[in-house]
C-alpha cells in the first residue's frame, strides 16, 4: 500500500512564526505536491516537485517555499505565518508519466493565531 | 478563474437511489479526468478516471461519463450507500506540466439511510 505521511495532524502557530510541514512517501514516486484545501475553493496547488532539488510554483505560491533534498521527502515552509494561511494542507505524490493518480497524506490542519 | 467547476456544493440522496455528481471544465486541452473522494479528517482517495478518448468508464457501482463537446463529465453512483457520504472532487489534467491536475471545489454528498 502506498503511504504518504505528514508530520502533524494539527498545528497551532502564531503570526510571524516560521512553520515547517513535512511529508514523506514510501513508493519511490518522482512527483510530490503540496495543496491547501479551503471551503468552496477545493484543492489549490501551492508547489510541486518532479525530482530531487527541483521545484515548480503552483497556483498560489506566495508566502510559501519548499524543499526536496531527498526523493521521499517534500517540505513546505511558511516563511512568516499569517492568519490567511490558516487552512488544511495536503501533501500528495505520484509516478511521473503515469495515470495522474495522486496519493494523498491525511492532511495537516494549521491554525495561525 | 476556475478551470474545473462543480456547481453543486452539496447533494442529498436516499440510500439505494442513484447519485449523480456533475463537473464542467473550460480548458479544451484537458485530456484526462479523475474523481476523488474525501472523508473528513482524511486525505482524498482516488476513485475513478477517464481518458478523453473514451466517453464512459465503469468500476463497480461507479461510472464516469464524459461529454467532450459539452466539456462536461458526471459521476454516477448506483446504488448509493451511506458509506458514500463524502466530498467528491473532480480533477483534470492537460497531459503536460509535470503531471499536474486541477481540482474542482468539490460536492458534498449525503446518502440518507
Image: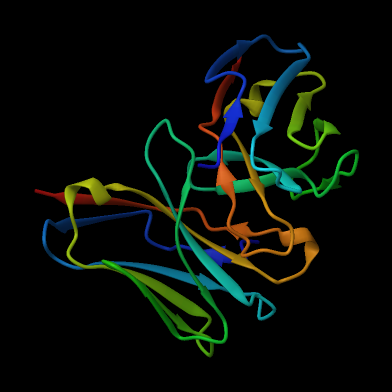
Picture layout, residue A104 above or below residue A109: below
Q: Residue at x 51, y 32 (%)?
A: A106
Q: Position of residue B19 (x, y in %)?
A: 24, 65
Q: Position of residue A96 (x, y in %)?
A: 74, 58
Q: Residue at x 60, y 26 (%)?
A: A6
Q: How is the image coloured?
A: rainbow
- Observer able to see residue A68: no
Tell which residue pokes out farthest to the right in this image.
Answer: A53
| Pick the front one: B62 or A38 | B62
| Pick the front one: A113 or A57 | A57
- Observer able to see residue B64: yes
Q: Position of residue A78 (x, y in %)?
A: 77, 24
Q: Is residue A79 left or right of residue B17?
A: right
Picture layout, residue B112 above or below residue B17: above
User: Exactly how many numbered labels are in the figure?
Assistant: 0
Q: Residue at x 47, y 78 (%)?
A: B72
Q: Quadrant of residue B81?
A: bottom left
Picture layout, residue A83 above or below residue A12: below
Picture layout, residue A11 above or below residue B13: above
Q: Position of residue A4 (x, y in %)?
A: 59, 35
Q: Quadrant of residue A28?
A: top right
Q: Residue at x 64, y 42 (%)?
A: A27
Q: Quadrant of the N terminus of chain B?
A: bottom right
Q: Is residue B61 left or right of residue B94?
A: left
Q: Is residue A19 left or right of residue B82?
A: right
Amino acid at each position: 500500500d502506498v503511504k504518504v505521511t505528514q508530520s502533524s495532524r494539527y498545528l497551532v502557530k502564531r503570526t510571524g512564526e516560521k512553520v515547517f510541514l513535512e511529508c514523506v512517501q514510501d513508493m519511490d514516486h518522482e512527483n510530490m505536491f503540496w495543496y491547501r484545501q479551503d471551503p468552496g475553493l477545493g484543492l489549490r496547488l501551492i508547489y510541486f516537485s518532479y525530482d530531487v532539488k527541483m521545484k515548480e510554483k503552483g497556483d498560489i505560491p506566495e508566502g510559501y517555499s519548499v524543499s526536496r533534498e531527498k526523493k521521499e521527502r517534500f517540505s513546505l515552509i511558511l516563511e512568516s505565518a499569517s492568519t490567511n494561511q490558516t487552512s488544511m494542507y495536503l501533501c500528495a505524490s505520484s509516478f511521473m508519466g503515469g495515470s495522474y493518480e495522486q496519493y494523498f497524506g491525511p492532511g495537516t490542519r494549521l491554525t495561525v493565531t | 478563474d476556475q478551470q474545473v467547476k462543480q456547481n453543486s456544493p452539496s447533494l442529498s440522496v436516499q440510500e439505494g437511489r442513484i447519485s449523480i455528481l456533475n463537473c464542467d471544465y473550460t480548458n479544451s486541452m484537458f485530456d484526462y479526468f479523475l474523481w476523488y473522494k474525501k472523508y473528513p479528517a482524511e486525505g482524498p482517495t482516488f476513485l475513478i478516471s477517464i481518458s478523453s478518448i473514451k466517453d464512459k468508464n465503469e468500476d463497480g457501482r461507479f461510472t464516469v461519463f464524459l461529454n467532450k463537446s459539452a466539456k462536461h463529465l458526471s459521476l454516477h453512483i448506483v446504488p448509493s450507500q451511506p458509506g458514500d457520504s463524502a466530498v467528491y472532487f473532480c480533477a483534470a489534467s492537460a497531459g503536460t506540466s509535470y503531471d499536474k491536475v486541477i481540482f474542482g471545489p468539490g460536492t458534498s454528498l449525503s446518502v440518507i439511510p
